[in-house]
Amino acid sequence: MEHEIEIVVIEDEEDILELVEYHLLREGYHVTGFLSTENVIRFLEEETPQLMVVDRNLPGVEGSDFVEKIREAGHDIPVIFLSAKNSEDDLERGFGVGGDDYISKPFNPKELVLRIQAVLKRSGVRINDKIRHRDMLLDLKKRELYMNNRRIDLTNLEFKLLYTFAKTPNQAVARDFLRDQVWGEDSETFHEKTINVAINRLRRKIDPDGTKEYFLPVWGIGYKLV
């Protein structure tokens, strides 16, 4: 099964990093590994991973300090700490800076995979070829949208547009990224107002009363699905 979900792993012990990468790749995830936090923030500015696995004992900066820093910068990517620091104070610190789960070393790779699946599910990311967000359910195999068990007819472009947002809910999605992901090769005929028009059409289909405010504009960037 292809997840199309990207996970960032920050772990300074190369053998552990390779072990985690191996098990996540085997589950069908796309994995980007880092041996330190260097270049991770730049990566987050260019990519939209759905989850991060972060060690606490990292060179240069402590893992929880790094997560606190990216939270302050506005990144709300789910984070699982994977660390030998396992005292009550360590756990309190990890969750206090915005960690979503905490796994102590030594760890069971299967448990890590199951906890990743649980965190992704809670954050609305696709599991088993479906994405649920609020009262929406996207069936990626059938390419269909259901709201409160009622099927909503979408064009192929509208489904791709909604899917692009649903992969990273509550995160700003840049206009250029939307253009490349949704319009792709047709982007040469793309106009500045094309995204606005497409989102407004999608809004009318999924929120005809205009009361749910699924899409919010993010000044200078694009939109986010909330």
Image: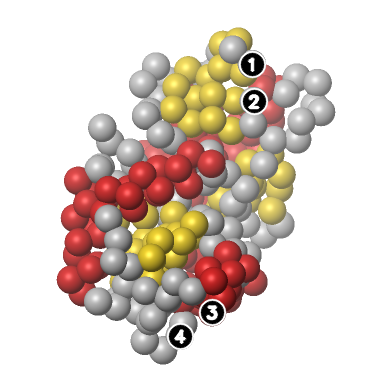
Residue 71 in view here: no
Q: Rounded to the nearest whole Å, what is the CA distance between mark 2 and mark 3?
A: 35 Å
User: Where residue 173 sits: x, y (%)?
Assistant: 56, 50
User: Where residue 82 sits: x, y (%)?
Assistant: 38, 66
Relative vertical location of residue 57 with respect to residue 204 in this rendering, above or below: below
Mark on residue 135? 2
Q: Earlier in the sequence, mark 2 or mark 3?
A: 3
Q: Rounded to the nearest whole Å, what is the CA distance between mark 4 and mark 2?
A: 40 Å
Mark on residue 139? none
Contact flag, marks 4 and 3 (Cβ < 8 Å): yes
Given the image, on which type of amino acid does mark 3 rest?
Asp
Instruction: Tell me which residue sits at (64%, 25%) in the image.
Output: 135
Q: Which residue is mark 4?
A: 61
Q: Which residue is mark 1?
A: 148
Q: Earlier in the sequence, mark 3 or mark 1?
A: 3
Q: Rounded to the nearest whole Å, what is the CA distance between mark 3 and mark 1?
A: 41 Å
Q: Earlier in the sequence, mark 2 or mark 1?
A: 2
User: Where residue 43 sits: x, y (%)?
Assistant: 41, 67
Residue neighbourhood size for the residue with mark 2, other residues' Cα within 10 Å, grouped as few (<14), some (14–19), many (≥20): few
> Depth-wise, is mark 3 or mark 1 nearer the camera?
3
Q: Earlier in the sequence, mark 4 or mark 2?
A: 4
Q: Which residue is mark 3?
A: 65
Q: Rounded to the nearest whole Å, what is the CA distance between mark 1 and mark 4?
A: 46 Å
Given the image, on which type of amino acid does mark 4 rest?
Val
Q: Quadrant of the C terminus?
A: top right
Q: Secondary structure at mark 2?
A: loop
Contact flag, marks 1 and 4 (Cβ < 8 Å): no
Given the image, on which type of amino acid does mark 1 rest?
Asn
